[in-house]
Amino acid sequence: MTPRQLALALRDLAVRDGYTELRALRVRVANLRWFTGRTFAATYETGAEIILSPELASQPDDIVGGIVTHEIGHALDFSYPGHWAIRNGEAILYDTAASPASRWWNRGHDAIERMADLIAESVFDVTIRYRGCQLLQSTTAGVRPRPRGL
Ligand SMILES: [Zn+2]
């Protein structure tokens, strides 16, 4: 399974589980200029598209899984702006906005990144860790939660 096929399979799983806003999510493989160093993927803030680097396919399976699942977490966050809240360490989706839109849009980098992990973990029942010298996402090994400033 390619990284893109994995992303599409996770999207479809989320839609089947009721996260219907994800139905329109597109996943594209492309070389963007900010895909350097440890960056192999990006999700637009509309939640409508994930871009995967062609280089992602050469990473080990646990890292592909960690990165793709994290990006789907961003897509779920961005597709339901302000509707996610953290309760007892789990991300829960609410029918109505859980926080004012202004506060949601003004979250800092660490809050956005950790929320993507929490949503992915809650929706897909995985654990996202950060491993290796580049601290890449992994579904099997490494530190958790995501180190600040990463
Ligand atoms: Zn991220």
Image: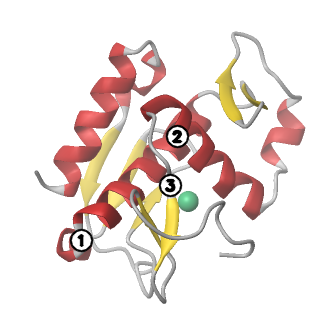
Q: CA distance from mark 2 to mark 3?
A: 7 Å
Query: Which residue is tagged 1?
Result: 60
First in sequence: mark 3 vs mark 1: 1
Crowding around mark 3 (Cα neighbors within 10 Å: few <14, some 14 to 19, many 20+) is: many
Q: Are marks 2 and 3 in contact (CB under 8 Å)?
A: yes
- Residue 128 badge: 3
**Could you tell me how far apart the alpha carbons at marks 3 and 1 are, in whole angstroms?**
15 Å
Q: Residue at x 44, y 88 (%)?
A: 37
| Amino acid residing under circle 3 | Ile
State left or right for residue 53 relative to residue 86. Answer: left
Give how far apart the Cα atoms at labels 1 and 2 are. Answer: 20 Å
| Residue toward you, 65 or 95 | 65
Quadrant of ligand 1: it is bottom right
Q: In the drawing, what numbered circle is on residue 79?
A: none
Q: Residue at x 69, y 10 (%)?
A: 95
Is 66 left or right of 3, judged from the image as shown? right
Mark 3 residue element: loop
